[in-house]
Amino acid sequence: MSTPYNVLILGASYGSLLATKLLLAGHNAKLVCLPAEVQLINAEGTIVRMPAKGREGLVEVRSRDLPGKLSADGPDAIDPSGYDLVALAMQEPQYRSPSVRDLLDRIAKARIPCMSIMNMPPLTYLKRLPGLDVEACRSAYTDPSVWDNLDPALMTLCSPDPQAFRPPEEKVNVLQVRLPTNFKAARFESEEHTDILRKLEADIEASRFEIDGAKVELPVKLKVHNSVYVPLAKWAMLIAGNYRCVLEDTVRPIKEAVHSNLDESRAVYNWVVELCLKLGASESDMVPFEKYANAALSLLSPSSAARALAAGAPYIERVDRLVQIIAAQKGMKSEALDRTVALVDSWLERNRKKAAA
């Protein structure tokens, strides 16, 4: 194994999955999270449950049993200069919180490379896509100015394909993985920073978890790609599945959103793939619809965006709106996507009125 890296992860829910993979590979992670999460994680560590090939049920991985060191802190306590890499794992609206925004500015000043594992790509990353009018995309963000100080050369994006959730009956340091696929990252502009990702990729690949004396290979790897378009493969999944969980007055599971009308889902999915190809992606950067539709069979809950709307959230990540804006730049339009954007808009309007009442 190479020298351990210290990785700062903003967000302890989905972030704890990446942290677990890093710890198992011998690297160290610091989770930036809410005070109650900080207290619990520093006292008890994290627990991630995931399926593993050849094992019945879920494998429980406790951070305290792993070679790397895990700790947690609030955003105000963080000095970014002590870290080799920052992973952005919060939902996009959370970055406008004053303390998190201030931490992002300190990360920018310290010039620490950042890898996003958000569904919504940081505005900074869009600047790495040639020919895109990034200014026109700002309206899709809760507060686009939080990204202004970060350097595109120091920002990469990871397609957050693994699906995980916090079981509602458990403490907040528990995460359960329902779809154990890989994180697919684009390279950084520099070889030096890309080398960090490649070392993490190799160490995660080589790591094994001991169960009853047997060394077991756990799923969810980091895969590093040279193409800046590989992480955009998630967009088709989000538009055909996650955002189509949102109906007029209710929400539905991802499986139902995809499989209740497979022809319509395929058409929406392939339309987004076509947009990515127009942006410069190659077919090999994308995931075929059949592979996604098969994975969606195991996604028996509504998406996190749909659940947030149903719970009254006044702001959510708007990948739907972002894709709509980018498509318009390429002369493309989808009635299905327009319907989805209108539905999400109306939910948010209702939620904001309730919040203001």
Image (spheres, grey):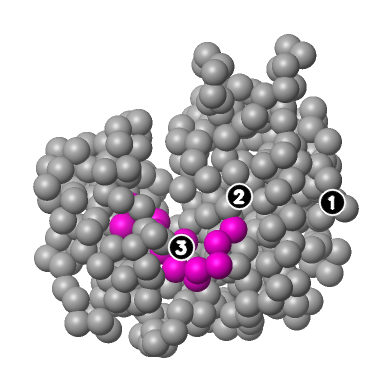
The location of residue 242, given as percent across then percent down, is: 32, 49
The location of residue 32, given as percent across then percent down, is: 70, 54
Q: Mark 1 packing: few (<14 Cα in 10 Å), some, or many (20+)?
A: few
**Residue 222: image tag:** 2
Residue found at x 72% / y 16%: 214
Residue found at x 13% / y 51%: 264
Q: Total label count?
A: 3
Q: Secondary structure at mark 1?
A: loop
- Asked if labels 3 and 1 touch by Cβ distance under 8 angstroms, the answer is no
Which comes before the other along the chain, label 2 or label 1? 1
Task: Specify the amino acid type for callout 1.
Answer: Ser
- Write down the quadrant of residue 272 in the picture: bottom left
149 versus 72 height, above or below: below
Q: Is residue 137 visible?
A: yes
Residue found at x 75% / y 72%: 192
Which comes before the other along the chain, label 1 or label 3? 1
Residue in the foreground of this view, choosing between 142 and 165: 165
Task: Specify the amino acid type for callout 3.
Answer: Val
Q: Is residue 293 magenta?
A: no
255 versus 355 height, above or below: above
For the record, the magenta segment spans: 224-238
Residue in the foreground of this view, choosing between 179 and 203: 203
Q: Mark 3 packing: few (<14 Cα in 10 Å), some, or many (20+)?
A: many
Residue 134 horizontal side relative to residue 40, left or right: left
**Residue beneath disc 1:** 2
- Asked if labels 2 and 3 touch by Cβ distance under 8 angstroms, the answer is no
**Residue beneath disc 3:** 230
Magenta stretch, main secondary structure, is helix
The location of residue 348, given as percent across then percent down, is: 30, 60
> Where, quadrant-wise, is the C terminus in this rendering?
bottom left
